[in-house]
Amino acid sequence: MFKLFAALRKERLWDFKGGIHPPEMKQISSEIPLRRIPLANLLIIPLQQHLGPEGDLLVKVGQQVLKGQALTRGNGRTLPVHASTSGTISAISHQVTAHPSGLTELCISLIPDHQERWAERKALPDYQAHSPQALIEHIHQAGIAGLGGAGFPTAAKLRGGADCVNTLIINAAECEPYITADDRLMREHAAEIVTGCAILQHILAPERILIGIEDNKPQAIATLRQALQGHQQIQLRVIPTKYPSGGAKQLIKILTGMEVPHGQHSASIGVLMQNVATVYAIKRAVIDGEPLLERVVTLTGEQMKHPGNVWAPLGTPVKHLLQHGGFIAQDKHPMVIMGGPLMGFTLSRLGVPVVKITNCILAPSRDEFSAPQEEQPCIRCSSCADVCPVRLLPQQLYWYSRGQEHDKARSHHLQECIECGACAYVCPSNIPLVQYYRREKAEIRALDDEARRAADAKARFEARLARLAREKAARQQRHQQAAVSVSHSDQATIQAALQRINLKKATAESEATTPDARQAAIAAAIARAKAKQATATSRSSDSDNANAQPAAAAAQPEDARKAAIAAAIARAKAKQATATSCSSDSDNANAQPAAAAAQPEDARKAAIAAAIARAKAKQATATSCSSDSDNANAQPAAAAAQPEDARKAAIAAAIARAKAKQATATSRSSDSDNANAQPAAAAAQPEDARKAAIAAAIARAKAKQATATSCSSDSDNANAQPAAAAQTSRTAERLQAAYGQAQPAAATPAQETTEQARQAAIATAVAQVKARQSLSTAAPTTSSSSPTEAQKAAVAAAIARIKARQSSAAASEE
């Protein structure tokens, strides 16, 4: 180690195996100063100009941008790209870029406005006051990548060697023929390059900084020596001209004598290398606040009338540079090479843009470059292996690349090839070995990317399966814990709930198995409906009978009036008896539930008797109507003698009937409320009520038939009943007395509601009697015969109807 340090102090140099000495051809452009060219009408800025993925877009079509404005976002190893000038974004599309494959990449098309309006610039002139991390981030956001040809992000390289770098090497060799961009940059901007070295020294704090330059650049060497005065840690090392001494591993070997291990970076041995153009870009980014917007490009070749080095904005089409270089095309498809003659590649289109790694545009003539010769089979001469600076086996790599044997090419360290072109330069079979290697590297990268995506997808799928399995296991564990960890109080609550459910079920079953109450209520409702229907039928038949004899009612003979009075009195008594029976039955319902069921025969007998009585009464009434109609013409003046008394009596009778109906309705409503107290008793006698209704209907039909017969046969008996009125009056008085004394003690507190009904009925009967008596006083009393049998029949019919209605009402209320 001490010998190594002593050798370094003595400026000792080492050599690497292989290499070639091609013609330099640098004088064509090295003696012409740097110049600027006008902006192109359209700039094409690729999003990926470095090793690594492209950034996310920050602009859209039609947007106005300023010079130095970031067009993409840079994170990690992704570098942002910036607008080389101010203008308008015209398109964002895929276009062919500067790559040997000729594939398309996403690019931003920018139309300059030629106003050079700058975006806000962030300069750090006092860089020593900032931390290395802040400076590295600033360099990263400036979009600086390695300008020597690799395009590796500078910030990523600085982060990797911030703690382990002992030696910083500035690569100024520029060994490839024709290229003089770094030479002119060192001649004209040596001071800025030294400032960039100082910034890197502040960031990395290396023990020494070595600038390696080939001895074929005497003017650049002199300028750098003068600029390095006062910088003891920065040493200038002039190395012999040999290609490819500008390679990273080769220059490290020359300056330090150390070799970078296979598969590792130079930082693993404490060495970090930066290109001289990259150092200049760092200075402009930190001190001036300018991102990487342009670079020096060499325009050379015998077809260039104005060769030299120009400042080319990134994104400038190659054809624009050729126009300002005075390019003269000798063929329809001229050969234009981007890069040097050994490491460059022929452009398929002249419209491809200048990118960060573009350092030369070479346009050779036919004499300068011989025509491409036909590829010949390999003769296994081993010349390619002799000149390989990395000590690979180019012949074997060629066979593997041509046969697409990717695994074997990988195993023979194809990735270590620096694509210097020395093997192709010495190949006697004119095999473009570098082209094969580049294609094979691209295919291997594509396979690796696909395998990486597949691995990521598999990892995501397996992670999903693992997550589902964990969730399932967690659910099962929660269920088991919930089943095991039920407390005593929870069990008591559950048992109480189960008992309530069982009790409700038992109650529902008992209710379903004991339908007596429901059936009784249903039977009672059916009995009440049928009884009401029978009552309505009876009333309708009575109203039909009333309409059937309008002439007899108008004639008003004495016998008919007596019979009507008797019938009214009987109806009043029947209503009173019905109310009394209903109230007494409702009071005694709970005490004797079976008493109502014990008397079915009485109701049937009463219904039959009522039907027979109504038939006889209608027959007697018809007879009296026909006899009275003959006597009606005998006394016209006497009937008109008492009109006032008849009208008053009729009005009083109408008022009395209205009151009686109202009282009857009140009594029925009260009875219907009391009917619910005896559902079983009411359900016990549905058959009796039906039989009584049927018997009443039959009796009414027979009565109607008898009445019609009697009216037609007895119409000639005119003067048969002159004294019937007196007898009917006496009979009405006796019925009224009997009605008043029938049941004096039967009224109970429950019957008080029917008192008004009875009084109204009595008043109605009395009024009817008075009216008919007033009419009968005008009639002649010449009739000597006394139809006692007809009167008795009418009274009996009225009493029978009252009893029938009483029994029907009782049956309906039950």
Image: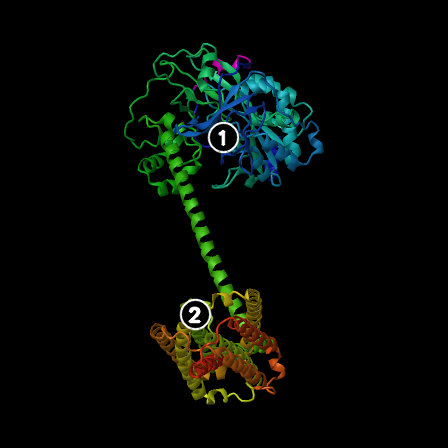
Q: Is residue 488 above or below residue 356?
A: below
In terms of secondary structure, where does tag 2 sit? helix
Asked if the residue under mark 1 is in contact with the one under mark 2, i.e. CB atoms within 8 Å, the reply is: no
Residue 326 visible at all = yes
70 to 485, vertically: above or below: above
Q: Which residues are magenta?
A: 23-34
Q: Look at the numbered disc 1 and give the secondary structure of its residue.
A: loop
Q: Position of residue 92 (x, y in %)?
A: 47, 28
Residue 122 is tagged as none
Q: Which residue occupies the foreground of this view, 751 or 328?
A: 751
- Residue 314: percent from left, percent from top: 52, 23
Q: Residue at x 44, y 87 (%)?
A: 600
Residue 28 is inside the magenta segment: yes
Looking at the rendering, in which quadrant would you find the N terminus? top right
Q: Is residue 521 left or right of 163 when viewed as pictured?
A: left
Q: Which amino acid, by three-letter code, is at mark 1?
A: Leu
| Left or right relative to 514: residue 221 | right
Identify the residue position indicated by label 2 in the image: 552
Give the CA distance from mark 2 to mark 1: 124 Å
Magenta stretch: includes residue 273: no
**Residue 670's image quarter?**
bottom right
Give the x, y percent position of residue 417: 43, 34
| Disc number placed over residue 47 in the picture, else none | 1
Of residues 644 and 379, the one drawn nearer to the viewer in this rendering: 644
Q: Nearer the viewer, residue 477 or 600?
A: 600
